[in-house]
Image (cartoon, coloured by chain):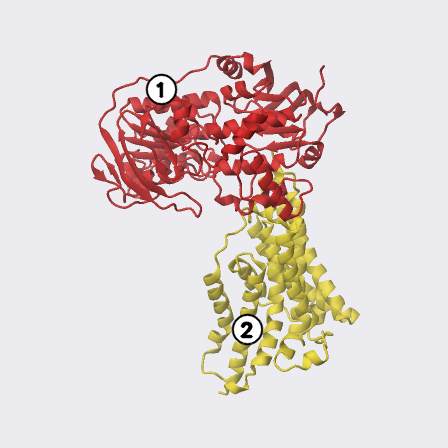
Amino acid sequence: MTETLLGIEGLTKAYPGVVANENVSFSIKPGEVHALLGENGAGKSTLVKTIYGLVKPDAGRMTLMGAPFEPAEPRAARIAGVAMVFQHFSLFDALSVAENIALGMEDPPKPRDLARRIREVSETYGLPLDPARVVGDLSAGERQRVEIIRCLLQDPRLLIMDEPTSVLTPQEVAILFDTLRQLSAEGTAILYISHKLEEIRTLCDAATILRLGKVVGSCVPKETSAREMAEMMVGGSLHVPERHPAPPGETVLRLSGLSAPSPRAFGTALKDINLDVHRGEVLGVGGVAGNGQDELLGALSGEILVRPGMIEMEGRDIGRVRPNARRRLGVLAAPEERMGHAAAPDMSLTENAVLSAAVRKAMLARGFVRWGQARTYAKEVIAGFDVRTPGPENAARSLSGGNLQKFVIGREILQDPEVFVVNQPTWGVDASAAAAIRQAILDLASKDAAVIVISQDLDELMEISDRFAALNEGRLSAPRPAAGLTVDEIGLMLGGAHDMDVAHLDHAEAGA
Amino acid sequence: MDLSAINPVVLVASLMVAATPILLAAVGELVVERAGVLNLGVEGMMITGAVCGFIVAVTTGSPLLGFVGAALGGALLSVLFGVLTQFLLSNQVATGLALTLFGLGLSALLGQGYVGVKSPTLSPVDLGPLSDLPVVGPILFAQDIIVYASLLLVAGVWAFLKFSRFGLILRAVGENHDAAHALGYHVIRVRMLAIMFGGACAGLGGGYLSLVRVPQWTEGMTAGAGWIALAIVVFASWRPWRLVLGAYLFGGVAVLQLNLQAAGIKVPVEILSMSPYLATILVLVIISVGRAPGSLGKPFHASG
């Protein structure tokens, strides 16, 4: 039996100077969960955009249910039964959840019925969502729920998911997987794009691997090791971060009863956080998005000023010290949002280097910027962190997510911080870049700096942290040594499946 | 000085007339800006509408046909803006400013033979006994049809943006044109339609000046009304009903200061003349809380 839902033959798409897809062929069966693997720039995005009707191929053909399939626009693809969850959320901040969902549907029902259906679907699949809330106030995890529910409401035959789990907790991932298995059992095929190879091994029935626009192989993920898949992707052997465990040094940063309201309208206030961070250690902070991660980073970087006595660095009260003065003391931070928070998108890499490194790298002289110094430093970051860009004069916006992330992290790490705080260091970054970033974090800790890594990727935290603490509704659990922690223990620290209806989880498991 | 000469009922009735051109132009610009386009050419489209409406009304003898001409004239000029900014990706601010200058010159040229000519004008609607009611009669039931139409237009735009599918798409395009494109909406088509609607509304506003408010043709007769309409849109936080507040406040102070001048109040005329602008901006700044549409003024080009 070789029934094919979506067949792709010889698909080619070239942009000026780069071939995004070259003679790509593969097929997806109904109900199959098919993984599309590849590094950033391997052509996955172009390929799924072609299937979704956003890009017209130069050559090749596609078939859907045996019939020729040439969607001229996403509307045609949606009518044919193809839905897509975007990696870079395609949401409208000023509109409500229900309005955002209606925009992604061909024939949306009346607002009241739509709100009811959103509640139904969100409860059935354990993804609670209030249809009336404004999307701009939602956390990254909640925004993704909007995208997923928008797709599920259309009863798609093929669901394309681009990096869907990067902002979810293990419990949420488990529930999403139950949802996807349920959909697959109902006959919906899923084209699943992810860098997380273990996830692909648990979920997917088949995998196609792309490198530099070409199909370089296919495999059955359940019978292939993660390492083998990663090496097919990269086309060489993959570097696994090494750590050199050392006894913890002296306390460098002390948080005592840190409480602070959130500056955002629907943010989470920090509540009574007590923590000692030592030199030479990596402290991992886990938790679901929207539980105070941004606020914690803000309080540590100096964007949020707190009352005296709450934050001490080597005995010195720094709670009311502003960001540049903290940088001078050696407290550096890299926030989650690359575009607009960690980097100014329309400014060059040199200018972005000045924005955070001016103080520590002596780029200022009597109120003037020493551009030569700045350019040298930007080049140093580009070289030291393998940032792929023609040069430091390029705008931050022109870099891919992974490359910009490497630049942002490198810009802070090369300033030799005493304390380094980073939120989501490898979100949406491909496997080899993520490994490089994690290695840099470990190297920094081994040079006697204290590192706080805030992340939603528990595998990452377990890989690099010495101690682990969980952030839940603005409260931080007591840190525990990361070695030997089990998934269940972490789950308890995170306060169970946050925001999840356990009854539905049981139901979904019974049904699976 | 004799303040008793100012009749509050006549004052309110005439402030609605004074506010209507600005309200019409502002509601059009509001739709344009909600679609993410900043058209600074409102003044130019208004004056073009004023002269086109005047010429059509004088030629045909029908003020209503004059308004049709005014709307068409404004819309045609806005198409020029639309083609330049949406297809040729010219800078919206510079193009809008150029459109105002172009409109002022074009209208002066077209109106050369019409200076001093008297145009047919609209008479107030006659609602019989309702119009004869004390106080509310002259204010609510004895205006001309365009005053009612302008309020209906505001209500229509409000309902369109809030409840209709196309209104939602328009807001989505203005909020995040890349996401709207990714979902398969035609950003440029939506924006061209919005720009043309804005042009037609500005044209109507201009036509109201030359056909009802004044009613004759003088060069540069809009005298900054288009700029006030632009300011009102921003200070009204892009919400239709607040436009009414802003426009009527401006109209009210404008009419009041004229009455005060006539009454011989001991305040320099220059200060009285600037008072409508000051009062409108002051009040709207105090009540403004909104945030601009996310993609306002940014060029859109479908790529990748």
Percent of width and height locating residue A235: 52, 14
Q: Quadrant of residue A485?
A: top left
The front one of A228 and B64 is: A228
Q: Quadrant of residue B254?
A: bottom right
The image's mark for residue B252 is 2
Percent of width and height locating residue B170: 63, 49
Residue at (30% x, 45% y) in the render? A306
Same subunit, tags 2 and 1? no
Q: Of circles 2 and 1, which is in front? A: 1
How many labels, in total?
Answer: 2
Residue at (79% x, 69% y) in the render? B60
Query: Does the image show residue A402?
Result: no
Amino acid carrying mark 2 in the image: Gly
Query: Does the image show residue A221?
Result: yes
Circle 1 residue: A484
Residue at (60% x, 65% y) in the render? B22
- Chain painted in yellow in the figure: B
Amino acid carrying mark 1 in the image: Gly
